[in-house]
Image (cartoon, helix red, strand yellow):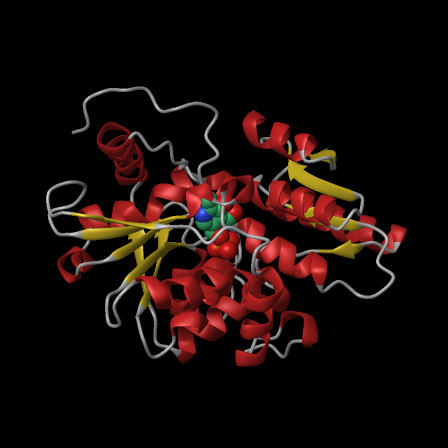
Amino acid sequence: MTPRDEANAVPGPAELSAAATRLAGKVRRTPTLALAAGDLCSVPVTLKLETLQHTGSFKARGALNAVLTAPVGTSSITAASGGNHGAAVAWAAAQAELPAHVFVPASVPAAKAALIVAYGATLHRVEGFYADALAASLTHAEQHSAHHVDAYDAEAVVAGQSTLGQELVEQIEPGRPVLVSCGGGGLFAGVSLALEGRNPVVAVEPATAPSLARALDAGQVVDVEVGGVAVDSLGARRAGGIAVDVARRLRSTTLLVSDDAIQQAQRRLWSTLRLAVEPGGATALAAAMTGPSSSDHPVVVLSGANVPAAPRLGPDR
Ligand SMILES: Cc1ncc(COP(=O)(O)O)c(C=O)c1O
């Protein structure tokens, strides 16, 4: 694996525990909902409703931990994002009374762009993909001595995301598989570290954006083509080095799901529970509804709610 500096080291137990203390009372301890066989899946399933988190996604956890641990003297924050991380950084910077600049691909969904602005950040639209927005954020950080908060491959961000897993320790039985959606892998890495030795964590990616699966096949991070219905949230062209290290060490499983299965999961959440969940937020459920792990009484993290409006109410198939 590539050597890494302090900022993108895999967080250890001390960092995970410090993040939990730091974020206590500042992020929401989101509830779980146990559902009977036949409600959403053919087997009983427990949902972790991270859709109820500040800013509408788990990203608030990592963003706030990163902002609160920024170097002393930090006077502004920058980030690149497909939308949810940007909204979370805008919110976190506002909590710390710091100005924030968020760089997004021009294709950002309007609802997410509006959230970023509503939380008080300056929005910069960049032609191209997430990688182009990332380059612009890093340049801005260098030119303006701002602190760049990475979306997934940073120790403080992964430690922040781990607090979701630390809550699960008190909410679910040991041994049950936990399914999380995966873009760059910050959520997967954080939850895996929190549940290490207690619950296996499965990374679920759209088949149209398989960055972690391809990295594990290749034995190193590689660039992949990305697209599909969840591209704004799970469309990282490269998995994070932290996620790849964690997945290799824990011998984690990854699953790929189709865009059709993701949309079916969204429809089912709406028709059964009246939950509006964005494609990236419903991707782990798509695996539980279709995949082999559905036999193991899975726990599914619903990671984000930021759709423009509730999905149309139609019969699910
Ligand atoms: C709703 C949602 N779920 C999951 C993810 C994946 O997070 P990560 O990049 O940490 O894998 C994202 C990333 O933006 C997201 O917005």
Q: Is residue 235 visible?
A: no
Report the quarter where the C terminus lies: top left
Report the quarter where the N terminus lies: bottom right
Residue 200, relative to residue 117: is it above or below?
A: below
Residue 293, relative to residue 306: is it above or below?
A: below
Residue that protrudes farthest toward the front in the picture: 25
Q: Residue at x 46, y 54 (%)?
A: 29
Q: Residue at x 27, y 30 (%)?
A: 267
Residue 226, relative to residue 114: is it above or below?
A: below
Q: Nearer the viewer, residue 103 or 38?
A: 38
Residue 298, relative to residue 219: is it above or below?
A: above
**Image quarter for residue 218?**
bottom left
Number of numbered labels in the structure image: 0
Q: Is residue 107 visible?
A: yes
Residue 254, horizontal then vertical, whole percent: 33, 62
Say left or right for 87 vs 259.
right
**Image quarter for residue 126?**
top right
Q: Residue at x 71, y 60 (%)?
A: 68
Q: Nearer the viewer, residue 201 or 5?
A: 201
Say left or right for 212 vs 76.
left
Say left or right for 256 vs 112.
left
Residue 153, horizontal then vertical, whole percent: 59, 63
Q: Nearer the viewer, residue 238 or 183?
A: 183
Q: Residue at x 35, y 42 (%)?
A: 282
Residue 273, horizontal then vertical, whole percent: 26, 33
